[in-house]
Image (cartoon, rainbow, N blue to C red):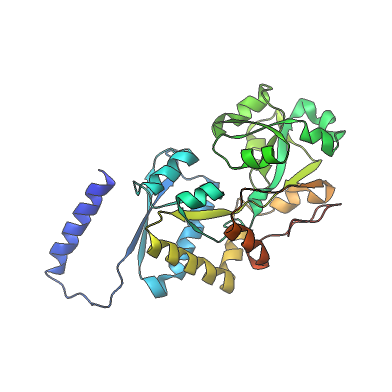
Amino acid sequence: MTRSLIRILTITFLAIYSGFNTVDASAKPKTVVYYNAAIQGIDPKQAYFISLLELALEKSRDQYGDYQLNAVMIDMPQGRALKMVEENNIIDVVWTMTSIEREAQLQAIYIPLLKGLMGYRIGLIRKRDQATFEKMDASGIKQTLMGQGTDWPDIDILHSNGFKVIGSIDRKLIAMLLKGRFDYYPRAIHEPWRDLARYPDVILDKRFLLNYPAPIYFFVNKANTRLAERIEYGLRKSIVDGSFDDLFYHHPITQDMIQKSQLDQRTEIVLTNPYLSKKSASLLNEPQLWITLTPKNTPTYQ
């Protein structure tokens, strides 16, 4: 059943139902939100953003009324999901790293959902290359060929800072690393642990930490101003009352990530992100929105 047909049937039902019931004229309409989830099921990373979206909608219930979240189980690369939201087709919201282009395409809700965590990157390498990376300095890592998802903004950020990067479909990147198509796979510090458990020939480089401003936002259609306002209201409220941080620090994808990453043993390489909009860059002045991690030798970007 298509989403359009579902909505038509819902509207028809409500019209019939209203003929038998007295409706409070002051009642707020229910906010129905469709989001994308993988056809194989919701993985822990998706679960974090869904939980945060639900938290925002729950915290905004006092101002905006009831809500309903519906999963659309279709495998979509980032680019397609963004296009679907832009066309107001199938899904209403997407979460992804921002860029100037994406903020022109869609309406960003300017709250970093991972507190900037996506910009703290540690690398997956082949086990047989461990000795090579242990002896490598910062100039060596800059000459190392890296792999990233084709539609990830990270490719442009790394290129702009002089790194060598190739792109591919994200689900192929580990296989490409193992086949020697590239040698270093930067991952945000909450991301590599499932891959390490699955692939015995892949290990974590312990030498370096790449760091650049990389906020992930919720994005909605430009015309969907009510939903954008509701999500921002709910997120801001959850930051003030502490429930945002409670979810962030205690979710399975982020719990113990700092200790496991051994940041105190790493050399930080601070990069610039020329693809931040002025609005996104201005958020760096709101410290309550960000996590600050300080490895040895080098200050953070804030």
- Residue 239: image quadrant is bottom right
Q: Residue furthest top?
A: 179
Q: Can residue 281 be seen in this view?
A: yes
Q: Which of 49 and 112 is in front in this view?
A: 112
Q: Which of 100 and 137 is in front in this view?
A: 100
Residue at screen point 20% across, 53% down:
8
Asked if residue 254 lies left or right of residue 80, the reply is right
Residue at screen point 52% across, 66% down:
235
Q: Position of residue 101 (x, y in %)?
A: 52, 47
How many numbered marks appear? 0
Of the 4 image quadrants, the one containing the C terminus is: bottom right
Asked if residue 295 lies left or right of residue 169, the reply is right
Residue at screen point 58% across, 61% down:
247
Q: Where is residue 233 in the image (x, y as percent from the top left)?
A: 48, 69
Asked if residue 128 lies left or right of residue 217, the reply is right
Q: In this view, does 3 lie above or below 229?
A: above
Q: Can residue 97 be seen in this view?
A: no
- Residue 111: image quadrant is bottom right
Q: Where is residue 116 in the image (x, y as percent from the top left)?
A: 64, 55
Of the 4 image quadrants, the one containing the N terminus is: top left
Q: Which of 54 and 83 is in front in this view?
A: 83
Q: Is residue 16 above or below residue 63?
A: above
Q: Where is residue 42 in the image (x, y as percent from the top left)?
A: 47, 45
Residue at screen point 66% across, 23% down:
181
